[in-house]
Amino acid sequence: QLALAASVVAEVVDRIVAEVNDEIITMSELQQMTRVIEAQSGIKPAGAEDRKIQREMLEALIDRKLAKAEAKRRGIKVSSKEVDETLDRFKQRNNIPDDATLAKALSNEGLSLKEFKQQIVDQLTQDRLLAMTVGTKVMISDAEVRKVYDERFKQGGTQVHLMSLRLPFPP
């Protein structure tokens, strides 16, 4: 009788890089966020600069998880209609005719349409949380905005999109 023993090789597919409350952040999440930033900037850092960016991305992911938990605690929600409206404005602003073209452009940057929509939800949630917690405490005058604009952008060559959102919040 011949017995064959199959050799099993254990391989680490992903690993936990941080834990925030009861949620984890995996290495693949961190790498995906880093790939998106690199694709958007067109820069592929190496060595110490790459480690610095990875650290900044990890801090951003931790902030996002903390904000998400606080928003949930405060009952902040984003509807699918709001996500769709934001997505439509994004497509219009970037001259993207349809979802298929958007999906292709996102795929070139390492994102799926579903992941992009989740980023929109996360951003809208974080914006609402920020508005609830500091929005009434921080006042920026038109003169201050003009001063910063004149200092940083008046030279030309830079396109700036400003949007003011006034959103109703739950009590």
Image (spheres, rainbow, N blue to C red):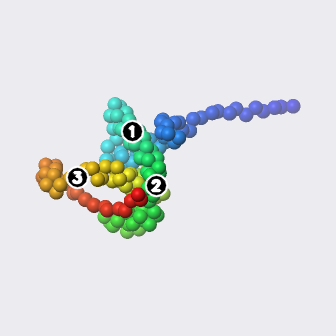
Q: Earlier in the sequence, mark 3 or mark 1?
A: 1
Identify the residue at image location x=39%, y=48%.
36
Q: CA distance from mark 3 to mark 1?
A: 27 Å
Label 2 sits on what residue type?
Gly
Task: Give the secondary structure at mark 3.
Answer: loop
Residue 34 percent across, percent down from the top left: 40, 43
Residue wearing tag 1: 59
Label 1 sits on what residue type?
Glu
Foreground mark, 1 or 2, reads 2
Residue wearing tag 3: 139
Q: Earlier in the sequence, mark 1 or mark 2?
A: 1
Residue wearing tag 2: 75
Characterize the local packing of mark 3: few (<14), some (14-19) or many (20 or more) Cα atoms within 10 angstroms.
few
Residue 110 percent across, percent down from the top left: 43, 50
Label 3 sits on what residue type?
Met
* Residues under numbered marks 3 and 1 in contact, where contact means CB atoms less than 8 Å apart: no
Q: CA distance from mark 2 to mark 3?
A: 25 Å
Number of numbered markers: 3
